[in-house]
């Protein structure tokens, strides 16, 4: 028995649930100070999946509910030693195969050692800090809340994910750019989906084209303006920059040479006056005005671009650049960057400083053997599947170029004579159900290793993880769960409806006191200590055969099986035991002494029960009545006894109703089914009785024919159902 130090916060986990996915009421405390793991056996429909789903809700922060009765108030409390809610990353739910459960960006932290990873992250944090400051400044410059990282990337490269390539590509162009003529243009006014859609309209596009044609004609004819070199925006910016840098204060002059005119400019005011005069002459052209009004008219019709319409009224010259929006976007972004050049250069210097060291770290990462490889090797070594695994994009994940690992799969023939590399979808197509589940375990293994690396204390809910596994892989996962439990960080709750798996968990590493069975008792669900995990007949009932009448009657099923497996069905003891589970001609005559004699002969004992002359059929019904009032829990003897009593009463009822001794005597096999068929045919009008008999046929056989050697007990049957059925059969009398 393991005891973990108190540094862990989840030594005691208290669960209190109401109306959570069919769990009406459950209150349970799990003492992980005494054990690293609990195993819970739950019949289908009792609570297993509901509990897993409730914990999954707690992990994701989602409210739980009752899906069938949503009006019911749901409460969910899962707390640790300090009474704090256990939620979020402190819970990991591993259910049956889920192909979406795979390596994540969190699990990718396993790909490099801690020291190297920290240095790598620090370098990126330095870059990210400078980049964030730069991008924020560009947002302010463009009067926009857009994310300018993909905007800049798409403007200068083919992809939205090539920001670094984009800013490196234009660095020389920014350095050579003398001014930022479009730095104050609001970005969202022109560069939005509505404008792009409007410009696809042939009428609007043609109107803008006509305007641009005339504007360019006027530029060519202008005294001082030149297309693409010195237009209104350039000239205004030059005037401003010359003044700000003291050009005119130093008594310098600017010479403007036109085709027929030369001007010597000695002040900012004089230069601005010339520019304004030239602009006015250009924009007052009647033909240009006519074409501008045509554009306005078209834009005014389109409510989606009214903002652009208003902007162009005050900034008409921008219209001349809208014939090529991608080019205009480049010019605008370059102006923004030029206006914030110090922050741009600071970012570029961080890129330069980190580039060399990042390459060194990536080279070192290639050489390192880290937890990923250990986890994959562990999977390859332990699980029996026809494929091998490897990480194909290790460096890319470390570098951040790709967020999630790409696993390589090599399919290997059983005799190792040939192999072929396949992708995951094709691999899953050729794998068996068990092999696909084994592959799923790999994903679980990665997540567990991540939590180990992060020292993250976790309550791990395991819901039928090994269902449909072959025995080799079932034992492999049990061994892995055992390893996880020994780490100390993990508190395991392993739930299953497979009793063989449940029994193997107990035999391998979970102590008997920590094996629980989920039972429904009316509106509540309880987790009670399981018993009978290891051969309940040999370890329990055999020792109480003479002093516990319930265990005596329940042992009939095992004794009958022992005779069948040793001397065969012709043995008289087999015949007598069969008459104790079916209503035969000699059933009313068989006594406790008859059963004692069979037990003594099979178990090499010489015991005697009280009241040896009591009829077995009377003892069965006497004990069945006590079962009706017994408390809930794992009462396997009650289950078998109720099934025997129900069948005996049902068969006796049908035999008396049919009243055909020759027919009954001629039944050689499947007596219950034969009687039901005859009864339903002869008494077709008794629909209620026929319905009850059908339930007897469905519910009693597996509860009686218990295999004493490969003990897979049929404890899935609820006591509540058998109690009701027994009462229904008794009521037919």
Image (spheres, rainbow, N blue to C red):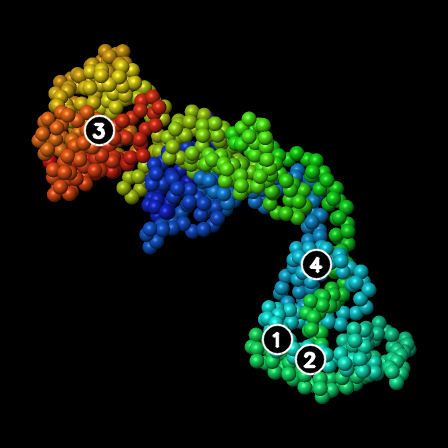
State how far apart marks 1 and 2 are (Cα).
12 Å
The numbered mark, 3 or 2, whose residue comes first in the sequence reads 2
Kindly identify which residue carries mark 1.
202
Kindly identify which residue carries mark 4.
157
Q: Residue at x 90, y 76 (%)?
A: 252
Kindly identify which residue carries mark 2.
210
State how far apart marks 4 and 3 are (Cα).
78 Å
SS at mark 2 in the image: helix
Q: Residue at x 71, y 84 (%)?
A: 288
Q: Pinpoint residue 84: horizontal percent, then vertical percent.
A: 47, 45
Mark sitting on residue 670: 3
State how far apart marks 3 and 2 are (Cα).
96 Å
**Local crowd size for mark 1, using a 10 Å CA cut-off: few (<14), some (14–19), many (≥20):** few
Q: Which quadrant of the rendered structure holds the C terminus?
A: top left
Which of discs 4 and 2 lies nearer the camera? The answer is 2
Which of discs 1 and 4 lies nearer the camera? The answer is 1
The numbered mark, 4 or 2, whose residue comes first in the sequence reads 4
């Amino acid at each position: 028995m393991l005891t973990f130090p108190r540094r862990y916060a989840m030594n005691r986990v208290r669960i209190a649930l109401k109306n959570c996915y069919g769990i009406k009421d459950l209150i349970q405390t799990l003492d992980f100070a005494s054990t690293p793991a609990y195993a819970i056996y739950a019949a289908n429909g009792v609570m297993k999946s509901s509990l897993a789903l409730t914990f999954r809700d707690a992990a994701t922060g989602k409210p739980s509910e009752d899906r069938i009765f949503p009006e019911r108030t749901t409460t969910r409390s899962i707390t640790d030693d300090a009474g704090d809610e256990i939620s979020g990353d402190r819970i990991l739910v591993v259910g049956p195969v889920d192909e979406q459960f795979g390596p994540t960006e969190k699990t990718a932290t396993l790909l490099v050692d801690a020291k190297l990873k920290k240095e790598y992250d620090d370098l990126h944090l330095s870059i990210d800090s400078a980049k964030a400051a730069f991008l924020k400044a560009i947002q302010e410059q463009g009067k926009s809340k857009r994310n300018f990282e993909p905007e800049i990337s798409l403007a200068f490269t083919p992809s939205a994910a090539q920001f670094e390539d984009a800013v490196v590509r234009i660095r020389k162009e920014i350095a050579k750019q003398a001014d930022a003529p479009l730095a104050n243009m609001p970005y969202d006014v022109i560069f939005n989906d509505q404008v792009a859609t409007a410009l696809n309209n042939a009428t609007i596009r043609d109107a803008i084209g006509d305007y641009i044609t005339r504007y360019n004609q006027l530029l060519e004819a202008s005294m001082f303006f030149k297309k693409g070199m010195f237009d209104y925006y350039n000239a205004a910016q030059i005037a401003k920059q010359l003044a700000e840098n003291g050009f005119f204060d130093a008594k310098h002059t600017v010479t403007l040479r036109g085709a027929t005119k030369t001007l010597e400019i000695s002040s900012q005011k004089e230069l601005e006056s010339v520019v304004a005069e030239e602009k006015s002459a250009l924009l007052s052209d009647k033909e240009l005005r006519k074409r501008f009004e045509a554009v306005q008219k078209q834009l005014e019709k389109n409510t989606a671009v009214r903002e652009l319409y208003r902007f162009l009224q005050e900034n008409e010259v921008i219209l001349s650049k809208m014939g090529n929006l991608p080019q205009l976007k480049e010019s605008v972004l370059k102006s923004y960057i030029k206006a914030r050049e110090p922050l741009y250069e600071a970012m570029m210097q961080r890129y330069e400083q980190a580039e060399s060291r990042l390459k060194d770290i990536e080279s070192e990462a290639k050489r390192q053997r880290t937890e990923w490889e250990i986890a994959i090797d562990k999977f390859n070594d332990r699980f029996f599947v026809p494929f091998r695994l490897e990480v194909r994009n290790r460096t890319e994940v470390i570098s951040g170029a790709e967020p999630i690992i790409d696993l390589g799969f090599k399919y290997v023939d059983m005799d190792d004579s040939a192999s072929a590399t396949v992708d995951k979808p094709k691999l899953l197509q050729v794998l068996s159900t068990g092999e696909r589940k084994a592959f799923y375990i790999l994903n679980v293994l990665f997540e567990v290793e991540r939590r180990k690396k992060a020292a993250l204390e976790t309550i791990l809910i395991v819901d039928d993880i090994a269902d449909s596994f072959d025995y080799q892989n079932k034992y492999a996962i049990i061994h892995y769960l055992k390893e996880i439990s020994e780490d100390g960080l993990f508190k395991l709750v392993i739930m299953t409806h497979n009793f063989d798996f449940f029994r193997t968990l107990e035999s391998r590493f979970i102590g008997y006191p920590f094996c629980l069975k989920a039972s429904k008792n009316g509106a509540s669900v309880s987790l009670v200590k399981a018993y009978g995990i290891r051969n309940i007949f040999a370890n329990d009932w055999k020792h109480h055969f003479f002093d516990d009448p319930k265990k005596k009657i329940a042992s009939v099923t095992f004794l009958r099986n022992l005779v069948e497996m040793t001397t065969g069905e012709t043995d008289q003891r087999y015949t007598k035991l069969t008459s104790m589970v079916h209503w035969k001609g000699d059933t009313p005559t068989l006594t406790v002494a008859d059963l004692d004699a069979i037990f003594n002969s099979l178990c090499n004992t010489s015991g005697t029960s009280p009241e040896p002359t009591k009829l077995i059929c009377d003892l069965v019904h006497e004990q069945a009545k006590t079962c009706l009032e017994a408390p809930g829990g794992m009462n396997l003897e009650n289950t078998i006894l109720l099934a025997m009593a129900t069948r005996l009463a049902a068969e006796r009822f049908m035999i008396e109703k049919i009243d055909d001794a020759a027919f009954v005597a001629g039944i050689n096999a499947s007596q219950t089914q034969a009687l039901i068929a005859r009864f339903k045919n002869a008494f077709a009008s008794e629909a209620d009785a026929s319905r009850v008999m059908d339930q007897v046929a469905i519910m009693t056989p597996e509860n009686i024919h218990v295999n004493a050697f490969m003990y897979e007990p049929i404890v899935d049957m609820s006591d509540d159902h058998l109690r009701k059925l027994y009462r229904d059969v008794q009521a037919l009398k």
